[in-house]
Amino acid sequence: MAQEGQQHPLSIYFFIWGLLFVLSFFSYMVDYLNLQGGLRWALILLFMFLKAGFIVSIFMHLAWERLALKMAILAPPIALMVLVCLMAIEADYTFLTRIVFFGEGAPLPVHH
Amino acid sequence: MSEAALTDTGEVLPVGTKGVVVDFSADKQAFQVPWGKAMMWFFLLSDTFIFGSFLTGYMTVRMSVTDAWPIPSEVFALSFGGEPIPLILIAIMTFILISSSGTMAMAVNMGYRKDRNKTFWLMVATAAFGVMFVSMQAFEWTKLIEEGVRPWVNPMGAAQFGSTFFMITGFHGLHVSAGVIYLLVIAFRVKNGFYEKRGGNYEIVEITGLYWHFVDLVWVFIFAFFYLW
């Protein structure tokens, strides 16, 4: 049985904690500054993945676990991301067909 | 930084990809962690699929409706007698949840140092932050319900906004509430020496921490996809 109770200096947790506040502030600024389009999407996703990454790897300790456990945890969410891509393609198609065949809401600027 | 994993006979297990092969071909157990930790990770994986399905469904609905989708920064703005500040309550809620993750991480550390008193108070602080979060979410709900948003209708635009909002934040709020109860139960057990009688093993604090960090993690995704997008 592997040794448990690996302790790391508290300072690393404080540093990441501070970083999470900073990243959250940046995420909030994306909206406050009313950035739009590709830049908005890119920054939202970047800060989101950075925050998620730090929480999982440091706070949830995954960085220090064995590779087998890391792979078991990280592979399913990758499968989920494949689902997200497929559903995005389908949703886009549904949207277009609703406009073309049902003549729905074309003049409205839809907020994606 | 990490201690090497050992077999029952004391040999050091290989790391990296070789370690993956050795782990998965082992005869007793695949994951060299206490069973409680492994089970909590597996539960969190299943929960990832639940929230993942909800968020994917929300994405699909939002992308495919032709009705206007309400703009979150306007819907969730609050004014304190002046200009409405966009998303201010959500920003505060995020701040609170991140603070709670910090107190939780410290509690785990204190637990391994066997400082029962500090562990107890840090877990109680984490739970208190959780209660604050749920209260604010409840306030958001009442505000939206007052404005006529329902799971089946929405005066501000697409009817699906209500159902996705209430379902996703509702499930998340439920998880936070359950986490608060879980935290308090474990905190009091730590304080009362329950784990001293069982050999002084405080892994349970780390396992509780895994659940709580997951709750924060889900909020990171909800915050990005629902409120910011």
Image (cartoon, grey):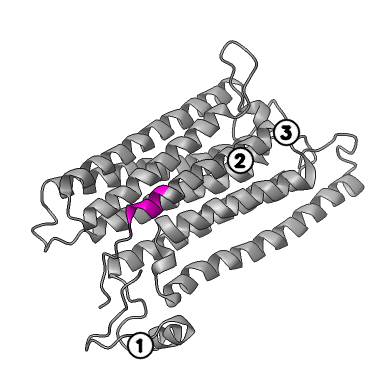
Is B117 placed left or right of A25 in the picture?
A: left
**Disc 2, SS:** helix
What chain does mark 2 sit on? Answer: A
Q: Which residue is mark 3?
A: A34
Q: State how far apart marks 3 and 2 are (Cα).
A: 12 Å
B129 up-or-down from B75: above or below: below
**Residue A35: percent from left, percent from top:** 74, 37
What chain does mark 3 sit on? Answer: A
| Mark 1: amino acid | Ala
Residue toward you, A78 or B43: A78
Check the picture and name the quadrant holding the C terminus of chain B: top right
Residue toward you, B88 or B194: B88
| Mark 2: amino acid | Phe
Q: Farthest residue to the top: give it.
A: B81
Q: Is residue B171 visible?
A: no
Q: Could you say which quadrant of the image residue B156 lies in?
A: top right
Q: State how far apart marks 2 and 1 are (Cα).
A: 45 Å
Q: Which residue is mark 1?
A: B26
A10 up-or-down from B76: above or below: below
- Which mark, residue A26? 2
Q: Could you say which quadrant of the image residue B174 lies in?
A: top left
